[in-house]
Image (cartoon, coloured by chain):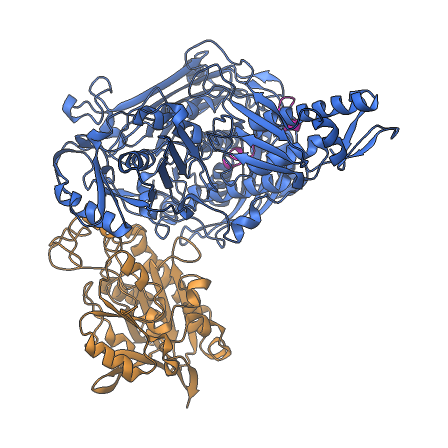
Amino acid sequence: MSGPIGKPTPFIDAVQKVTGQAMYAGDYRMPNMLYVRFLRSTESHAIISKLDTSEAESYPGVCAVVIGKEIPISFGVLPISPDENAIAIDKVRYKGEIVAAVAAETIEAAREGAKIIQVEYEPIRLFLEPEDSLETCAFHEQIHSHTKNGKNIHKTAELRFNEPEKEIKTAAHVRREKFKFAGVTHAFTEPHSTIAVWNGDDTLTVISATQVPHYLHRNLAKVLGLPMHSIQVKKPALGGGFGGKSDPFPHEIITAYMAMKTKRPVKCTFSREEVFITNHGRHPTEIDMSVSCDQNGKITALDTDIIIDGGAYGSFGVVTSYYNGVLLQGPYRINKFGFRTRRVYTNKPQCGAMRGHGAVNPRYAVEVMLDMLAHDMNMDPCDLRINNFLPENTLTVGQLRITSNGVRECLDTVRMKCDWDNRYGKLPSGHGLGVACGFFISGSALPIIWNRYPQTVVHAKLDFDGRIVMFSGASDIGQGSDTVLVQIAAEELGITMGHVQVEVADTKITPVDLGSYSSRVTFMVGNAAKTAATKVREEMAKAIAKEKGVIAENLIFNNCRIYTKDETVDLSWEEGVEIALAGRGAFVESGYYISPKLGGTFKGAGAGLSPAYSFGAFISEVKVNPNTGEVNVIKIWGAHDCGKALNPLSVEGQIEGSIHMGLGQAMSEELRYKNGQQMNANFFDYRIPSSLDTPDMDITIIESNDAEGPYGAKEAGEGPIHPVLPSIGNAIYDAVGIRMMELPITPDKVLSKLRGGE
Amino acid sequence: MDYYHSPSSIKDALSMAGKFSGNYTIFAGGTDIQIYRKQQLDTNEHIIDLSGIDELNSIATKEGILHLGAMTTLDEIISSDEIQLHYPLIAEAAKSVATPVLRKTATIGGNLLVKNRCVFYNQSQAWRNGMGSCLRDVGTICQVTGGKKDCYSRNVSDTAAALIALGAEITLMTPDGITQKPLKDIYLPCGIKFHNLEEHSILTQISVPIKPKKWWYKKLRLRKTLDFTSLTVAATVDINSIARVCLNGVSMSPILVEQTMDTLTQENLTRQARKNCKTVDNDLMPLKYRREMINVFLEEWWDSIEII
């Protein structure tokens, strides 16, 4: 490739962002703008017995006060579980839920207005832990009326193939273990922020910090009762999402409603504490897992029972429930396989999608158990894994289609780089190495909302100025999707990246894209962009060939020139553009992406299907202080198969970020609650690893060149997180001989195990 | 900004304090106080910022005694050759506070007088409304102990532990004049009124007489930077073999065990420390672990002494 594809490329918006020039949602100001603040519930589960807003309505500066009954239509990111209202109606389900909203001339007036709303609650039975929610309760005590059998179970996802439970009873080597994981949250830099404008032509413009303008667009239409063609959703520069900005949120709907109601621009920006209590992070999880091997070290069966604590609302929870199970089908061949995941409602802020969605916690469990089985069988943990890897081009037991697969090369690489064979099991006490692998989807093959549209469309426009504009609904949330669009167009047309600009994430201007989640954007948008840019090239070639009397296919687009090999035609880019646009002017070409039809026909067969899967292997090195239980992660080697690194700089960044985020969940991050109230809803007490806590990283990009990915690319944003956590857990075992079955691995837990406790 | 005042002399600062009596907050760097203001834990109308008083910013040694101006930043202390060479314990303690960026603003005086902390108190007003009663805030029941009388919020000053172990004295200026007293005497074993200071007094200087024969310092926290302490132990042994072991972060005030090495045993030390520390479950690190770590840290110190 002669263009920018495959070369380390700084993001096109990098300078804007680091110099503070980029416009984030919070930076927007409009004339006559109002500010929204909220009254939030101080109860975890209660009937709202009194709600009097009259005093607030007459407070100086207050322009509108809204309560739940005014916006009664429920919504949710998944059309199968729209269980949330913009503002609580009649009852509250978690501490911090929005009970009323106030729009005022100043933030202070809005805040004071919210403060003087009179509210009274009648508390009802609390369900704070999953075991509470599995108990039967009276109908009026249920968190939601739609759950069945008097319990607060939101979803039970279960799949079984080939009776794993029978194999586990008789296999040569079996382990059954229990694991527990605290909830963690995304902790992105930019707080949620939304501006809504009611335009003179009775249309609504919403500028919001969202990963998915399209789902916000749909849910705004549904809840506000507006036709979709009257709503424009724009995503400006965005400061991180990690899954935490992929749902449509109450504050977005309320802000839009306030703009409709007051006919004035309205803005809402969260405090950090509000970001924390809004959550949507990784589910607290309890896993009971059995894994068996035959005497040759072949995995024969895996069976697991998982409970995930969903908090008060559904969010992506149905998908999370499935992902907890189905994403255990790789990277190893497991022919007897089963899982059941129960997602329960509790009276806490809701959980949802977070980097590595649904698969991070069970990945920890299975990788630790493989390590245990390797020790039981006196086998090297790397060898046990190699012995069981899925090959390329195969189907898993649940009919996930594996195409390219570089997992073996990943493991061989980190094993060699860390000198595993000479060091594993041989380091002094307190010092250890641990290995783990993982895999992840490159986009979900099935869209959340079933319809006949493609998953993405990209338009490429060429005009007389020689500029290509790529129109895409894709949301750059810091992962660099805008840059990939530019790279692809420049590559296909043989022009500089400076010739290409983007118009993105604006539902009025850009074609629909399903959003930045499930690691789908490079794969799907990349393919569509490549098609669109290729079509522009073909269209130009056709016109030039006709004028110059050569064969279109013989024209080469490279280095800002368009030429034939024998140079009978040798045009500058601008000359080529003039010929291509003669008599017709600017034109637009379009590319789209639809996943191939994949998967089985059984119920639940759609979960986990993806056109391609990334793979990875990581090794961690730790030192453990036996006196204090403190664990020092000193180095992590990571190898990740992303198919083809379109931008190696960005892939490396994603792997580094995954290591940092995985380290946080493994060692120090957890959302803590007392009586349903978050104890650490700030960046001081929610302990993200600092630069000093972050180990040296040795990163290798493995390129397996996927046949269906753009230029061979697969995902790199989420897959690398999975092996990080269990590699640390396994390294602690190598260092001091204890198995950490509960995350985060804080020093108190380590010390307790070292001293023989549980 | 009619609420913000920046006096250029201690005298002016004291007269402002008198003028705004009961309704002012002193900024000695302000890195912590700003959070109190944001969380509406500090709602005083006036701010008296001491950063414009040049005489409070100094590091000097006179007749073998180190004098630190109260407004000397922690970063200046860490970077001082004099302190690194002769008082490495102070440098070590200062370096363990907050982060490099905060230490460029945070001062030694501010850190010595840092307010006591509790996970149920150091929260936003909305958060506290959701949780309810707190003896130090509003209400009559403590969320930590369920008690109605005593607040056990923790003193978290790392530099206090070090300077008490060094036998530091402080200079206080009030409208009535200058007083000097041992640093340890300004701390009270109370989670609500934790500083024994007269009204309108300004801490101006810290004086450190001892260059110890041996010193030791360790801070317990989950991350290697930023976090407030869950247990700080600073220890010295002077030329007369007097051991001064000061623990902080585990009680309402720093806990000092001062005893000659001739009679001190590890067991005796640990017993005294554990008895004097009123440690309750008011930190994010578990109570049991923090208590265990008192033993572990003191044992580590004891072992280090014997090796020397």
Residue drawn at the location 44% of the way across and 66% of the way down:
B95
Q: Which chain is blue?
A: A
Q: What stretch is highlighted in magenta?
A: A707-721
Q: Which residue lies furthest to the top in this view?
A: A601
Does A718 lie within the magenta span? yes
Percent across and percent down for residue A685 are: 34, 51
Give the side of residue A553 with respect to residue A260, left or right. right
Query: In terms of image quadrants, where is residue B194?
Result: bottom left
Give the side of residue A155 with respect to residue A44, left or right. right
Q: The orange chain is which one?
A: B
Does A217 lie within the magenta span? no
Q: Is A447 located above or below residue A433 in the figure?
A: above
- Quadrant containing the N terminus of chain A is top right
Camera-side residue: B98 or A651? Answer: A651
Camera-side residue: A538 or A370? Answer: A538
Q: Is A632 located above or below residue A711 in the figure?
A: below
Residue drawn at the location 20% of the way across and 63% of the way down:
B191
Percent across and percent down for residue B108 are: 37, 73
Q: Is residue A439 visible?
A: no
Q: Is B181 located above or below residue A551 in the figure?
A: below
Query: In terms of image quadrants, where is residue A182?
Result: top left
Q: Can residue A654 be seen in this view?
A: yes
Percent across and percent down for residue B174 are: 23, 83
Q: Residue furthest bottom?
A: B63
- Quadrant containing the C terminus of chain A is top left
